[in-house]
Image (spheres, rainbow, N blue to C red):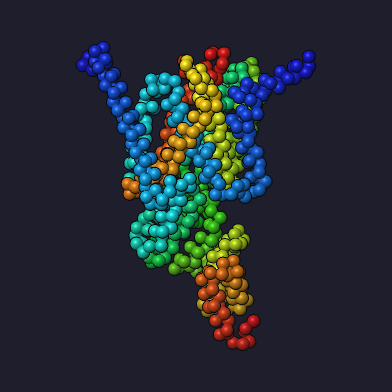
Amino acid sequence: MANAKTPAAGHTTRPLKAFVSRLVFVLSVSVFVAGVGLGVYESWSEERRLPPIYIDYTDEIEELSQSTDYERTIEELWLAAKLDHFAHRPRHFFDLCRTGFRANDRKTMREGLEGLRLLMETGGSADSRIHFYLSVAISLQPDANKDDLFEALGYADQATQEQPDFAPAHVQLGQLFAILAVGENKQVDVVELQRAALCCETALAIDPSNTDAARTLSEIQQILRSLPSSDRP
Amino acid sequence: MKKSRTSSIASRLAGRTFVHPVFDYLLIGGGASLVVAAFVYARQGEALINIEMLPVFILFSNSAHFAASTVRLYTKPDSFKSLPFVTMLLPFVMLALLTICITWARQCGSHLQAIYLTWSPYHYAAQAYGLAVMYAYRSGCTLGKTDKRWLWWASMLPFFYVLIYGREGGLHWLLQTFVAEEGIGYFSWSPVLNSFSTVLAQIAFLLPAFAFYSIARGEGGSLPIISMLLIVTNGIWWYLLPALNAFAWATIFHGIQYLAIVLIFHLRDQMGRAGNRHGAAYHVAWFYLVSFALGYGLFQCLPFAYRWIGFGMLESYLLVSAAINIHHFIVDAYIWRLRGSDSNRRIVDPSLA
Protein backbone atom coordinates (compact mmCIF):
# COMPACT_ATOMS: atom_id res chain seq x y z
CA MET A 1 0.00 0.00 0.00
CA ALA A 2 2.90 2.28 0.76
CA ASN A 3 3.81 2.27 -2.94
CA ALA A 4 0.30 2.95 -4.17
CA LYS A 5 0.00 6.31 -5.81
CA THR A 6 -2.79 8.47 -4.53
CA PRO A 7 -4.50 10.75 -7.06
CA ALA A 8 -3.05 13.72 -5.21
CA ALA A 9 0.50 12.35 -5.49
CA GLY A 10 0.02 11.70 -9.21
CA HIS A 11 -1.26 15.22 -9.57
CA THR A 12 1.91 16.70 -8.11
CA THR A 13 4.38 14.40 -9.90
CA ARG A 14 2.97 15.03 -13.35
CA PRO A 15 3.69 18.80 -13.50
CA LEU A 16 7.09 18.17 -11.90
CA LYS A 17 7.89 15.53 -14.51
CA ALA A 18 6.75 17.85 -17.29
CA PHE A 19 8.83 20.68 -15.84
CA VAL A 20 11.96 18.50 -15.63
CA SER A 21 11.39 17.23 -19.17
CA ARG A 22 11.09 20.77 -20.47
CA LEU A 23 14.15 21.85 -18.54
CA VAL A 24 16.20 18.97 -19.97
CA PHE A 25 14.95 19.77 -23.44
CA VAL A 26 15.84 23.47 -23.15
CA LEU A 27 19.24 22.49 -21.77
CA SER A 28 19.90 20.08 -24.68
CA VAL A 29 18.84 22.63 -27.28
CA SER A 30 21.05 25.28 -25.63
CA VAL A 31 24.02 22.91 -25.56
CA PHE A 32 23.45 22.01 -29.21
CA VAL A 33 23.15 25.66 -30.32
CA ALA A 34 26.24 26.55 -28.31
CA GLY A 35 28.04 23.56 -29.85
CA VAL A 36 27.21 24.68 -33.38
CA GLY A 37 28.33 28.21 -32.52
CA LEU A 38 31.58 26.93 -31.02
CA GLY A 39 32.15 24.74 -34.06
CA VAL A 40 31.80 27.72 -36.38
CA TYR A 41 34.10 29.75 -34.11
CA GLU A 42 36.73 26.97 -33.99
CA SER A 43 36.72 26.52 -37.75
CA TRP A 44 36.89 30.28 -38.33
CA SER A 45 39.65 30.93 -35.82
CA GLU A 46 41.77 28.00 -37.01
CA GLU A 47 41.15 27.98 -40.73
CA ARG A 48 39.48 31.33 -41.47
CA ARG A 49 36.47 29.66 -43.03
CA LEU A 50 33.12 28.13 -42.11
CA PRO A 51 33.17 24.37 -41.40
CA PRO A 52 33.81 22.79 -44.80
CA ILE A 53 31.41 20.50 -46.62
CA TYR A 54 34.04 17.77 -46.61
CA ILE A 55 35.80 17.29 -43.31
CA ASP A 56 39.13 15.62 -43.94
CA TYR A 57 39.81 14.07 -40.58
CA THR A 58 42.88 12.29 -41.96
CA ASP A 59 44.86 15.58 -42.10
CA GLU A 60 45.70 15.47 -38.40
CA ILE A 61 46.74 11.82 -38.63
CA GLU A 62 48.89 12.53 -41.67
CA GLU A 63 50.61 15.29 -39.72
CA LEU A 64 50.98 13.12 -36.66
CA SER A 65 52.44 10.20 -38.61
CA GLN A 66 55.41 12.43 -39.53
CA SER A 67 56.18 13.22 -35.89
CA THR A 68 58.78 11.50 -33.72
CA ASP A 69 56.39 11.09 -30.81
CA TYR A 70 56.03 7.45 -31.79
CA GLU A 71 54.07 6.32 -28.76
CA ARG A 72 51.31 8.88 -29.32
CA THR A 73 51.36 8.36 -33.06
CA ILE A 74 50.90 4.61 -32.71
CA GLU A 75 48.09 5.11 -30.20
CA GLU A 76 46.27 7.56 -32.50
CA LEU A 77 46.75 5.38 -35.55
CA TRP A 78 45.27 2.40 -33.72
CA LEU A 79 42.25 4.50 -32.81
CA ALA A 80 41.93 5.59 -36.44
CA ALA A 81 42.16 2.00 -37.70
CA LYS A 82 39.54 0.97 -35.16
CA LEU A 83 37.02 3.74 -35.78
CA ASP A 84 37.39 4.55 -39.43
CA HIS A 85 35.07 2.42 -41.51
CA PHE A 86 35.59 4.49 -44.63
CA ALA A 87 38.19 3.91 -47.31
CA HIS A 88 41.08 5.32 -45.26
CA ARG A 89 41.57 2.30 -43.04
CA PRO A 90 44.35 0.69 -45.18
CA ARG A 91 46.22 3.97 -44.97
CA HIS A 92 46.05 3.87 -41.17
CA PHE A 93 47.48 0.34 -41.07
CA PHE A 94 50.15 1.36 -43.55
CA ASP A 95 51.10 4.36 -41.40
CA LEU A 96 51.18 2.07 -38.37
CA CYS A 97 53.63 -0.17 -40.16
CA ARG A 98 55.82 2.76 -41.23
CA THR A 99 55.75 4.33 -37.77
CA GLY A 100 56.66 0.96 -36.28
CA PHE A 101 59.60 0.80 -38.69
CA ARG A 102 60.81 4.27 -37.73
CA ALA A 103 60.35 3.52 -34.03
CA ASN A 104 62.03 0.11 -34.44
CA ASP A 105 58.88 -1.43 -33.00
CA ARG A 106 58.55 -4.86 -34.61
CA LYS A 107 55.22 -5.64 -32.97
CA THR A 108 53.53 -2.56 -34.44
CA MET A 109 55.08 -3.24 -37.84
CA ARG A 110 53.73 -6.78 -37.82
CA GLU A 111 50.29 -5.68 -36.61
CA GLY A 112 50.10 -3.02 -39.31
CA LEU A 113 50.91 -5.63 -41.94
CA GLU A 114 48.39 -8.10 -40.48
CA GLY A 115 45.70 -5.42 -40.56
CA LEU A 116 46.40 -4.76 -44.23
CA ARG A 117 46.38 -8.46 -45.06
CA LEU A 118 43.04 -8.97 -43.32
CA LEU A 119 41.51 -6.00 -45.09
CA MET A 120 42.60 -7.36 -48.42
CA GLU A 121 41.58 -10.95 -47.73
CA THR A 122 38.11 -9.94 -46.62
CA GLY A 123 37.70 -7.46 -49.45
CA GLY A 124 37.26 -4.77 -46.84
CA SER A 125 38.95 -1.98 -48.68
CA ALA A 126 37.85 0.51 -51.27
CA ASP A 127 41.35 2.00 -51.32
CA SER A 128 42.94 1.40 -54.69
CA ARG A 129 46.39 1.68 -53.11
CA ILE A 130 46.03 -1.30 -50.84
CA HIS A 131 48.41 -3.41 -52.95
CA PHE A 132 51.03 -0.70 -52.81
CA TYR A 133 50.64 -0.43 -49.04
CA LEU A 134 50.91 -4.19 -48.67
CA SER A 135 54.00 -4.35 -50.82
CA VAL A 136 55.80 -1.67 -48.79
CA ALA A 137 54.60 -3.12 -45.48
CA ILE A 138 55.97 -6.57 -46.38
CA SER A 139 59.32 -5.24 -47.53
CA LEU A 140 59.70 -3.19 -44.34
CA GLN A 141 59.48 -6.28 -42.11
CA PRO A 142 62.94 -7.01 -40.65
CA ASP A 143 62.46 -10.76 -41.02
CA ALA A 144 61.22 -10.63 -44.63
CA ASN A 145 62.73 -13.50 -46.63
CA LYS A 146 63.04 -14.04 -50.37
CA ASP A 147 59.52 -15.49 -50.67
CA ASP A 148 58.10 -12.49 -48.84
CA LEU A 149 59.92 -10.16 -51.20
CA PHE A 150 58.52 -12.03 -54.18
CA GLU A 151 55.05 -11.62 -52.68
CA ALA A 152 55.74 -7.90 -52.21
CA LEU A 153 56.92 -7.73 -55.82
CA GLY A 154 53.61 -9.23 -56.99
CA TYR A 155 51.64 -6.62 -55.04
CA ALA A 156 53.80 -3.78 -56.34
CA ASP A 157 53.29 -5.02 -59.89
CA GLN A 158 49.52 -5.12 -59.28
CA ALA A 159 49.67 -1.60 -57.83
CA THR A 160 51.39 -0.23 -60.94
CA GLN A 161 48.72 -1.79 -63.13
CA GLU A 162 45.87 -0.46 -60.99
CA GLN A 163 47.23 3.07 -60.87
CA PRO A 164 49.78 3.49 -63.68
CA ASP A 165 50.25 7.18 -62.88
CA PHE A 166 51.17 6.57 -59.22
CA ALA A 167 54.94 7.06 -59.18
CA PRO A 168 55.69 5.57 -55.70
CA ALA A 169 54.33 2.19 -56.87
CA HIS A 170 56.82 2.14 -59.76
CA VAL A 171 59.66 3.07 -57.38
CA GLN A 172 58.62 0.29 -55.01
CA LEU A 173 58.56 -2.20 -57.87
CA GLY A 174 61.97 -0.98 -59.03
CA GLN A 175 63.45 -1.25 -55.54
CA LEU A 176 62.16 -4.80 -55.16
CA PHE A 177 63.57 -5.84 -58.55
CA ALA A 178 66.90 -4.34 -57.51
CA ILE A 179 66.95 -6.06 -54.10
CA LEU A 180 66.13 -9.43 -55.66
CA ALA A 181 68.70 -8.88 -58.44
CA VAL A 182 71.47 -8.19 -55.95
CA GLY A 183 70.33 -10.85 -53.48
CA GLU A 184 72.62 -12.61 -51.04
CA ASN A 185 74.79 -15.48 -52.29
CA LYS A 186 73.75 -14.85 -55.79
CA GLN A 187 75.27 -13.41 -58.86
CA VAL A 188 73.87 -10.05 -59.85
CA ASP A 189 70.96 -10.52 -62.23
CA VAL A 190 71.59 -7.87 -64.87
CA VAL A 191 68.23 -8.30 -66.59
CA GLU A 192 66.37 -7.76 -63.33
CA LEU A 193 68.54 -4.74 -62.56
CA GLN A 194 67.69 -3.27 -65.91
CA ARG A 195 64.01 -3.81 -65.17
CA ALA A 196 64.50 -2.02 -61.85
CA ALA A 197 66.12 0.89 -63.65
CA LEU A 198 63.22 1.02 -66.11
CA CYS A 199 60.70 1.18 -63.25
CA CYS A 200 62.56 4.10 -61.70
CA GLU A 201 62.69 5.85 -65.06
CA THR A 202 58.93 5.39 -65.42
CA ALA A 203 58.44 6.87 -61.94
CA LEU A 204 60.62 9.84 -62.85
CA ALA A 205 58.71 10.36 -66.08
CA ILE A 206 55.49 10.56 -64.04
CA ASP A 207 56.97 12.66 -61.26
CA PRO A 208 60.40 14.18 -61.98
CA SER A 209 60.65 15.39 -58.37
CA ASN A 210 60.50 11.86 -56.91
CA THR A 211 63.74 11.69 -54.95
CA ASP A 212 63.36 7.99 -54.10
CA ALA A 213 63.23 7.13 -57.78
CA ALA A 214 66.27 9.31 -58.58
CA ARG A 215 68.29 7.85 -55.70
CA THR A 216 67.42 4.23 -56.54
CA LEU A 217 68.16 4.79 -60.22
CA SER A 218 71.56 6.27 -59.46
CA GLU A 219 72.39 3.32 -57.14
CA ILE A 220 71.34 0.83 -59.83
CA GLN A 221 73.48 2.62 -62.42
CA GLN A 222 76.41 2.53 -60.01
CA ILE A 223 76.02 -1.25 -59.56
CA LEU A 224 75.74 -1.75 -63.32
CA ARG A 225 78.90 0.31 -63.88
CA SER A 226 80.77 -1.70 -61.25
CA LEU A 227 80.05 -5.00 -63.01
CA PRO A 228 82.81 -6.64 -65.07
CA SER A 229 82.49 -5.52 -68.70
CA SER A 230 81.47 -9.06 -69.77
CA ASP A 231 78.42 -8.89 -67.48
CA ARG A 232 77.35 -5.40 -68.52
CA PRO A 233 74.38 -5.06 -70.82
CA MET B 1 -14.75 -2.51 -72.70
CA LYS B 2 -11.51 -4.46 -72.99
CA LYS B 3 -9.55 -1.22 -73.08
CA SER B 4 -11.12 0.09 -69.90
CA ARG B 5 -10.44 -3.24 -68.15
CA THR B 6 -6.80 -3.09 -69.19
CA SER B 7 -6.45 0.48 -68.00
CA SER B 8 -8.09 -0.42 -64.69
CA ILE B 9 -5.59 -3.28 -64.17
CA ALA B 10 -2.76 -0.95 -65.13
CA SER B 11 -3.86 1.73 -62.70
CA ARG B 12 -4.34 -0.86 -59.95
CA LEU B 13 -0.81 -2.13 -60.52
CA ALA B 14 0.59 1.38 -60.66
CA GLY B 15 -1.07 2.04 -57.29
CA ARG B 16 -2.30 5.25 -55.80
CA THR B 17 0.64 7.62 -55.71
CA PHE B 18 1.08 10.68 -53.51
CA VAL B 19 2.17 13.25 -56.07
CA HIS B 20 2.39 11.79 -59.57
CA PRO B 21 3.42 8.31 -60.76
CA VAL B 22 6.65 9.69 -62.27
CA PHE B 23 7.59 11.49 -59.05
CA ASP B 24 6.66 8.61 -56.77
CA TYR B 25 8.30 5.89 -58.88
CA LEU B 26 11.51 7.81 -59.53
CA LEU B 27 12.16 9.44 -56.18
CA ILE B 28 10.25 7.47 -53.55
CA GLY B 29 10.27 4.10 -55.28
CA GLY B 30 13.97 4.49 -56.05
CA GLY B 31 13.63 4.20 -59.85
CA ALA B 32 16.16 7.00 -60.36
CA SER B 33 18.70 5.11 -58.24
CA LEU B 34 18.34 2.07 -60.51
CA VAL B 35 19.28 4.21 -63.49
CA VAL B 36 22.38 5.42 -61.64
CA ALA B 37 23.17 1.85 -60.50
CA ALA B 38 22.99 0.71 -64.13
CA PHE B 39 25.46 3.46 -65.12
CA VAL B 40 27.79 2.53 -62.26
CA TYR B 41 27.59 -1.13 -63.25
CA ALA B 42 28.26 -0.35 -66.91
CA ARG B 43 31.33 1.66 -65.93
CA GLN B 44 32.43 -1.07 -63.51
CA GLY B 45 32.71 1.11 -60.46
CA GLU B 46 34.44 4.00 -62.21
CA ALA B 47 33.31 7.23 -60.54
CA LEU B 48 30.22 8.71 -62.20
CA ILE B 49 30.95 12.21 -61.03
CA ASN B 50 34.00 14.10 -59.89
CA ILE B 51 34.85 12.67 -56.47
CA GLU B 52 35.06 16.21 -55.05
CA MET B 53 31.37 16.71 -55.87
CA LEU B 54 30.27 13.72 -53.78
CA PRO B 55 30.27 15.57 -50.42
CA VAL B 56 28.00 18.21 -51.98
CA PHE B 57 25.47 15.54 -52.99
CA ILE B 58 25.77 13.98 -49.54
CA LEU B 59 25.20 17.33 -47.82
CA PHE B 60 22.14 18.21 -49.89
CA SER B 61 20.55 14.77 -49.68
CA ASN B 62 21.94 12.61 -46.91
CA SER B 63 22.74 15.18 -44.21
CA ALA B 64 19.45 16.98 -44.86
CA HIS B 65 17.54 13.70 -44.57
CA PHE B 66 19.00 12.94 -41.12
CA ALA B 67 17.98 16.37 -39.94
CA ALA B 68 14.57 16.03 -41.63
CA SER B 69 13.46 13.36 -39.16
CA THR B 70 14.18 15.77 -36.30
CA VAL B 71 12.43 18.65 -38.06
CA ARG B 72 9.46 16.38 -38.73
CA LEU B 73 9.43 15.25 -35.09
CA TYR B 74 9.12 18.81 -33.81
CA THR B 75 6.68 20.03 -36.45
CA LYS B 76 4.34 17.03 -36.38
CA PRO B 77 1.02 17.95 -34.75
CA ASP B 78 0.91 17.04 -31.04
CA SER B 79 4.31 15.32 -31.06
CA PHE B 80 5.41 16.88 -27.74
CA LYS B 81 2.29 15.45 -26.13
CA SER B 82 2.33 12.03 -27.76
CA LEU B 83 6.11 11.47 -27.77
CA PRO B 84 7.45 13.16 -24.61
CA PHE B 85 10.57 10.98 -24.31
CA VAL B 86 11.66 11.27 -27.93
CA THR B 87 10.98 15.00 -28.19
CA MET B 88 12.30 16.18 -24.85
CA LEU B 89 14.70 13.65 -23.33
CA LEU B 90 16.27 11.80 -26.25
CA PRO B 91 18.39 14.79 -27.41
CA PHE B 92 19.96 14.97 -23.95
CA VAL B 93 20.54 11.20 -23.84
CA MET B 94 22.21 11.31 -27.25
CA LEU B 95 24.41 14.30 -26.40
CA ALA B 96 25.52 12.61 -23.19
CA LEU B 97 26.16 9.29 -24.94
CA LEU B 98 28.13 11.02 -27.69
CA THR B 99 30.28 12.91 -25.21
CA ILE B 100 30.98 9.75 -23.23
CA CYS B 101 31.93 7.86 -26.40
CA ILE B 102 34.23 10.61 -27.63
CA THR B 103 35.87 10.89 -24.23
CA TRP B 104 36.50 7.15 -24.08
CA ALA B 105 36.79 6.68 -27.85
CA ARG B 106 39.12 3.71 -27.55
CA GLN B 107 36.77 1.78 -25.28
CA CYS B 108 33.31 2.87 -26.44
CA GLY B 109 33.77 4.60 -29.79
CA SER B 110 34.08 1.52 -31.93
CA HIS B 111 30.96 0.01 -30.30
CA LEU B 112 28.93 3.13 -31.06
CA GLN B 113 30.14 2.86 -34.66
CA ALA B 114 29.28 -0.82 -34.78
CA ILE B 115 25.78 -0.23 -33.39
CA TYR B 116 25.17 2.40 -36.03
CA LEU B 117 26.54 0.22 -38.83
CA THR B 118 24.49 -2.78 -37.69
CA TRP B 119 21.34 -0.73 -37.34
CA SER B 120 21.73 1.11 -40.63
CA PRO B 121 20.77 -1.77 -43.00
CA TYR B 122 17.84 -2.56 -40.71
CA HIS B 123 16.72 1.06 -40.96
CA TYR B 124 16.92 0.94 -44.76
CA ALA B 125 14.99 -2.33 -44.85
CA ALA B 126 12.36 -1.07 -42.43
CA GLN B 127 11.91 2.08 -44.54
CA ALA B 128 11.42 -0.06 -47.66
CA TYR B 129 8.94 -2.29 -45.82
CA GLY B 130 7.05 0.64 -44.28
CA LEU B 131 6.73 2.44 -47.60
CA ALA B 132 5.72 -0.78 -49.41
CA VAL B 133 2.93 -1.38 -46.89
CA MET B 134 1.93 2.29 -47.01
CA TYR B 135 1.50 2.17 -50.80
CA ALA B 136 -0.40 -1.12 -50.54
CA TYR B 137 -2.73 0.39 -47.98
CA ARG B 138 -3.25 3.55 -50.06
CA SER B 139 -3.89 1.54 -53.19
CA GLY B 140 -6.64 -0.49 -51.60
CA CYS B 141 -4.64 -3.69 -51.23
CA THR B 142 -5.57 -5.38 -47.98
CA LEU B 143 -2.60 -7.23 -46.55
CA GLY B 144 -3.28 -10.21 -44.35
CA LYS B 145 -0.92 -11.35 -41.60
CA THR B 146 0.80 -13.85 -43.91
CA ASP B 147 1.16 -11.29 -46.69
CA LYS B 148 2.76 -8.86 -44.30
CA ARG B 149 5.11 -11.60 -43.06
CA TRP B 150 6.28 -12.38 -46.61
CA LEU B 151 6.79 -8.72 -47.36
CA TRP B 152 8.68 -8.24 -44.11
CA TRP B 153 11.05 -11.12 -44.85
CA ALA B 154 11.54 -9.95 -48.42
CA SER B 155 12.41 -6.48 -47.12
CA MET B 156 14.65 -7.70 -44.33
CA LEU B 157 16.88 -10.04 -46.33
CA PRO B 158 19.39 -7.32 -47.26
CA PHE B 159 19.64 -6.53 -43.54
CA PHE B 160 20.29 -10.16 -42.65
CA TYR B 161 22.85 -10.33 -45.44
CA VAL B 162 24.77 -7.34 -44.02
CA LEU B 163 24.30 -8.65 -40.50
CA ILE B 164 26.07 -11.88 -41.44
CA TYR B 165 28.63 -10.63 -43.93
CA GLY B 166 29.17 -7.00 -42.97
CA ARG B 167 32.72 -6.35 -41.83
CA GLU B 168 32.03 -3.31 -39.68
CA GLY B 169 29.19 -4.45 -37.48
CA GLY B 170 26.66 -7.25 -37.12
CA LEU B 171 27.88 -10.76 -36.37
CA HIS B 172 31.50 -9.86 -36.96
CA TRP B 173 31.37 -7.15 -34.32
CA LEU B 174 29.45 -9.38 -31.88
CA LEU B 175 31.99 -12.18 -32.35
CA GLN B 176 34.88 -9.82 -31.94
CA THR B 177 33.37 -8.31 -28.82
CA PHE B 178 32.07 -11.38 -27.06
CA VAL B 179 33.87 -14.39 -28.52
CA ALA B 180 37.32 -13.69 -29.86
CA GLU B 181 39.53 -10.73 -30.64
CA GLU B 182 40.16 -12.24 -34.06
CA GLY B 183 36.51 -11.92 -35.04
CA ILE B 184 37.64 -10.77 -38.45
CA GLY B 185 39.02 -14.25 -39.05
CA TYR B 186 35.44 -15.47 -38.94
CA PHE B 187 35.24 -14.83 -42.65
CA SER B 188 38.16 -17.04 -43.47
CA TRP B 189 37.17 -19.91 -41.19
CA SER B 190 33.66 -20.01 -42.46
CA PRO B 191 33.72 -20.96 -46.16
CA VAL B 192 30.28 -22.57 -45.85
CA LEU B 193 28.82 -19.30 -44.62
CA ASN B 194 30.61 -17.42 -47.38
CA SER B 195 29.31 -19.68 -50.13
CA PHE B 196 25.82 -19.11 -48.76
CA SER B 197 26.10 -15.37 -49.40
CA THR B 198 25.37 -15.70 -53.15
CA VAL B 199 22.36 -17.89 -52.42
CA LEU B 200 21.08 -15.35 -49.91
CA ALA B 201 21.47 -12.54 -52.46
CA GLN B 202 19.50 -14.56 -55.02
CA ILE B 203 16.75 -15.37 -52.52
CA ALA B 204 16.54 -11.67 -51.72
CA PHE B 205 15.45 -10.97 -55.30
CA LEU B 206 13.21 -14.01 -55.66
CA LEU B 207 11.33 -13.53 -52.41
CA PRO B 208 9.77 -10.15 -53.34
CA ALA B 209 8.56 -11.70 -56.60
CA PHE B 210 7.07 -14.59 -54.66
CA ALA B 211 5.43 -12.20 -52.17
CA PHE B 212 3.98 -10.19 -55.06
CA TYR B 213 2.59 -13.35 -56.68
CA SER B 214 1.24 -14.73 -53.43
CA ILE B 215 -0.52 -11.45 -52.53
CA ALA B 216 -1.98 -11.10 -56.04
CA ARG B 217 -3.51 -14.57 -55.73
CA GLY B 218 -5.13 -13.72 -52.40
CA GLU B 219 -8.39 -11.91 -51.80
CA GLY B 220 -6.94 -8.60 -50.67
CA GLY B 221 -6.11 -7.36 -54.15
CA SER B 222 -2.78 -7.02 -55.92
CA LEU B 223 0.18 -5.18 -54.53
CA PRO B 224 1.13 -1.99 -56.44
CA ILE B 225 4.37 -2.30 -58.39
CA ILE B 226 5.92 0.56 -56.44
CA SER B 227 5.83 -1.61 -53.30
CA MET B 228 7.90 -4.24 -55.09
CA LEU B 229 10.20 -1.61 -56.56
CA LEU B 230 10.95 -0.27 -53.09
CA ILE B 231 12.02 -3.69 -51.82
CA VAL B 232 14.03 -4.65 -54.90
CA THR B 233 15.77 -1.27 -54.98
CA ASN B 234 16.87 -1.66 -51.38
CA GLY B 235 18.30 -5.07 -52.28
CA ILE B 236 20.27 -3.57 -55.16
CA TRP B 237 21.60 -0.85 -52.87
CA TRP B 238 23.00 -3.40 -50.45
CA TYR B 239 24.13 -6.17 -52.83
CA LEU B 240 25.31 -4.41 -55.95
CA LEU B 241 26.53 -0.96 -55.01
CA PRO B 242 28.96 -1.97 -52.22
CA ALA B 243 30.54 -4.50 -54.58
CA LEU B 244 31.13 -1.65 -57.04
CA ASN B 245 32.49 0.62 -54.31
CA ALA B 246 29.54 2.91 -54.97
CA PHE B 247 27.52 2.62 -51.78
CA ALA B 248 27.59 6.42 -51.45
CA TRP B 249 24.90 6.47 -54.14
CA ALA B 250 22.64 4.29 -51.99
CA THR B 251 22.93 6.75 -49.11
CA ILE B 252 22.19 9.65 -51.46
CA PHE B 253 19.08 8.00 -52.91
CA HIS B 254 17.92 6.77 -49.52
CA GLY B 255 18.10 10.43 -48.46
CA ILE B 256 16.16 11.59 -51.51
CA GLN B 257 13.51 8.92 -50.90
CA TYR B 258 13.18 9.98 -47.30
CA LEU B 259 13.08 13.70 -48.06
CA ALA B 260 10.38 13.19 -50.70
CA ILE B 261 8.06 11.25 -48.40
CA VAL B 262 8.66 13.38 -45.31
CA LEU B 263 7.96 16.52 -47.33
CA ILE B 264 4.65 15.07 -48.46
CA PHE B 265 3.62 14.32 -44.87
CA HIS B 266 4.79 17.70 -43.60
CA LEU B 267 3.03 19.51 -46.41
CA ARG B 268 -0.28 17.73 -45.85
CA ASP B 269 -0.14 18.41 -42.12
CA GLN B 270 0.66 22.08 -42.61
CA MET B 271 -1.89 22.64 -45.36
CA GLY B 272 -4.54 20.97 -43.23
CA ARG B 273 -3.87 23.24 -40.25
CA ALA B 274 -6.60 25.69 -39.35
CA GLY B 275 -5.38 29.18 -40.10
CA ASN B 276 -2.69 28.14 -42.58
CA ARG B 277 -1.82 31.23 -44.65
CA HIS B 278 0.98 29.82 -46.80
CA GLY B 279 1.07 27.88 -50.04
CA ALA B 280 2.65 24.47 -50.70
CA ALA B 281 5.89 25.97 -52.08
CA TYR B 282 6.45 27.89 -48.84
CA HIS B 283 6.05 24.81 -46.63
CA VAL B 284 8.26 22.67 -48.86
CA ALA B 285 10.98 25.34 -49.04
CA TRP B 286 10.78 26.02 -45.29
CA PHE B 287 11.04 22.37 -44.34
CA TYR B 288 13.92 21.62 -46.69
CA LEU B 289 15.92 24.72 -45.78
CA VAL B 290 15.54 24.10 -42.06
CA SER B 291 16.56 20.44 -42.56
CA PHE B 292 19.52 21.48 -44.68
CA ALA B 293 20.70 24.05 -42.12
CA LEU B 294 20.27 21.59 -39.26
CA GLY B 295 22.11 18.90 -41.23
CA TYR B 296 25.01 21.29 -41.80
CA GLY B 297 25.05 22.22 -38.12
CA LEU B 298 25.02 18.59 -37.02
CA PHE B 299 27.51 17.04 -39.41
CA GLN B 300 29.78 19.94 -40.24
CA CYS B 301 29.77 22.24 -37.18
CA LEU B 302 29.35 19.96 -34.19
CA PRO B 303 32.59 17.98 -34.79
CA PHE B 304 34.52 21.26 -34.66
CA ALA B 305 32.97 22.02 -31.27
CA TYR B 306 34.43 18.75 -29.95
CA ARG B 307 37.75 19.65 -31.52
CA TRP B 308 37.58 23.00 -29.71
CA ILE B 309 37.15 21.08 -26.44
CA GLY B 310 40.36 19.21 -27.26
CA PHE B 311 39.36 15.96 -28.94
CA GLY B 312 40.85 14.79 -32.22
CA MET B 313 38.98 15.48 -35.45
CA LEU B 314 38.86 11.78 -36.26
CA GLU B 315 36.86 10.68 -33.22
CA SER B 316 34.83 13.91 -33.22
CA TYR B 317 33.70 13.57 -36.81
CA LEU B 318 33.17 9.80 -36.91
CA LEU B 319 31.36 9.55 -33.59
CA VAL B 320 29.19 12.63 -34.15
CA SER B 321 28.08 10.98 -37.42
CA ALA B 322 27.37 7.68 -35.64
CA ALA B 323 25.32 9.41 -32.92
CA ILE B 324 23.29 11.40 -35.47
CA ASN B 325 22.53 8.16 -37.30
CA ILE B 326 21.38 6.41 -34.14
CA HIS B 327 19.23 9.37 -33.11
CA HIS B 328 17.67 9.34 -36.59
CA PHE B 329 16.91 5.60 -36.37
CA ILE B 330 15.19 6.02 -33.00
CA VAL B 331 13.18 9.07 -34.05
CA ASP B 332 12.13 7.30 -37.22
CA ALA B 333 10.75 4.39 -35.28
CA TYR B 334 8.24 6.79 -33.71
CA ILE B 335 7.32 9.43 -36.25
CA TRP B 336 6.01 7.06 -38.92
CA ARG B 337 3.52 5.22 -36.79
CA LEU B 338 0.09 4.82 -38.32
CA ARG B 339 -1.73 3.73 -35.21
CA GLY B 340 -4.90 5.15 -33.70
CA SER B 341 -5.55 8.81 -34.26
CA ASP B 342 -2.07 9.61 -35.55
CA SER B 343 -2.15 12.31 -38.24
CA ASN B 344 -0.06 10.03 -40.50
CA ARG B 345 -3.05 7.76 -40.87
CA ARG B 346 -5.12 10.53 -42.40
CA ILE B 347 -2.39 11.28 -44.92
CA VAL B 348 -1.89 7.67 -45.99
CA ASP B 349 -5.60 7.04 -46.35
CA PRO B 350 -7.35 10.24 -47.52
CA SER B 351 -10.77 8.65 -47.04
CA LEU B 352 -10.25 9.14 -43.28
CA ALA B 353 -9.71 12.89 -43.66
Quick one: which residue is furthest to the top in this view? A7
Residue at 61% across / 24% down in the picture? B19
User: Residue placed farthest to the bottom in the image?
Assistant: A229
Please state if B73 lies on the left or on the right of A162 as rendered: left
A154 or B323: nearer the viewer:
B323
Image coordinates for residue A122, horizontal then vertical, percent: 53, 50
Query: In which image quadrant can residue A188 be found?
Result: bottom right
Q: Residue furthest left?
A: A2
In the rendered image, residue A109, in percent from the top left (x then y), is placed at 42, 62
Using the image as rendered, state which of residue B121 and residue A185 is in the foreground: B121
Q: Which residue lies furthest to the front in this view?
A: B277
What's the residue at 41%, 59% (across, down)? A63
Residue B83 in view: yes
Q: Position of residue B338 (x, y in %)?
A: 49, 20
Asked which quadrant contains residue B129, the reply is: top right
- Residue under the image location 46 percent in, 47 percent down: A52
Q: Is residue B226 above or below residue A59?
A: above
Answer above or below: position of A122 versus B212. below
Place of residue B255 in the rendered image (x, y in percent of width and height, measured from the top left): 53, 35
